[in-house]
Amino acid sequence: MQKTLYIVRHGQTDLNKQGIVQGRGRDTDLNDEGRRQASQFYQAYKDVPFDKIYISELKRTQQSIQPFIDLGIPYQKLAGLDELAWGVHEGQPATPGTKAAFLQLMRDWLDGKLDEKFEGGESPNEVKERQLQAMETIMSHPEEKTVLVCMHGRALRLLMCILTNQPLTQMDTFPHQNLVLYKVTYDGSRFKIVEANNAKHLKND
């Protein structure tokens, strides 16, 4: 079975613009810039013959690829594609204290402490488990040769580790911004990233 996955992060929201983490618990809308990014992505990839679309259960992912859904391409929401939950820090303004807490958590993850998490949040290992379930669903349809996936920043980094058989400690080696593309192919035995952090479609009008 061969498959090509076009995996994108959602477009910009106001909280993105403000540098505030949203996580799984903040179901925010795209802002004007995010809608512009969505339009740019659609114009660049509208001729790709997508067989199926997979999105998270958060509306910012659907809003980011709505023009493709409007073409009649079938889509499915998967909780496994949701963003990592940041718990008590979701939607909260950045302070010196919260910045220090995030920095310490990132260090813990880099050191391999992948069960660490904020109160009410999720660890990378917990996100991995639900992402594996999501990928099992996506890969269980061999007839879907070309698939569009819209998800979230931290979750995307973790998924790239999973697909390329790298430890989750390598998550920060996968850069991203709003509505960038990671194009991944599957040849029947392994995944390969053929385009990484592609933002060519986000040209200035």
Image (cartoon, rainbow, N blue to C red):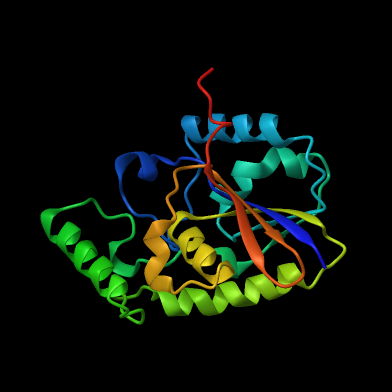
Looking at this view, name the residue that lies furthest to the left: 96
Determine which quarter of the picture holds residue 108.
bottom left
User: How many numbered marks have been drawn onto this rendered protein structure?
Assistant: 0
The percent coordinates of residue 150 (x first, y second) are: 61, 52
Residue lying farthest top? 205
Q: Is residue 65 above or below residue 143?
A: above
Q: Is residue 17 left or right of residue 82?
A: left
The quadrant holding residue 43 is top right
Whether residue 182 is visible here, answered yes or no, is yes
Residue 21: give x, y in percent of width and height.
34, 54
Residue at x-position 37% and y-position 59%:
172
In the image, residue 204 above or below residue 48? above
In the picture, which quadrant includes the C terminus? top right
**From where the camera sits, is residue 118 visible?**
no
Q: Residue at x 45, y 48 (%)?
A: 176
Left or right: residue 101 compared with residue 196? left
Q: Residue 105 location in percent, x, y?
A: 25, 70
Q: Position of residue 76 (x, y in %)?
A: 72, 60
Q: Is residue 168 left or right of residue 64?
A: left
At a point 57% along the width and 64% down the height, the residue shown is: 81
| Residue in the picture at 84% in, 67% down | 142
Residue nearest the observer in this picture, 204 or 26: 204
Q: Is residue 116 above or below residue 17?
A: below
In the picture as drawn, the residue positioned furthest to the right comes out as: 143
Question: Dividing the image into 4 quarters, which one contains the N terminus?
Answer: bottom right
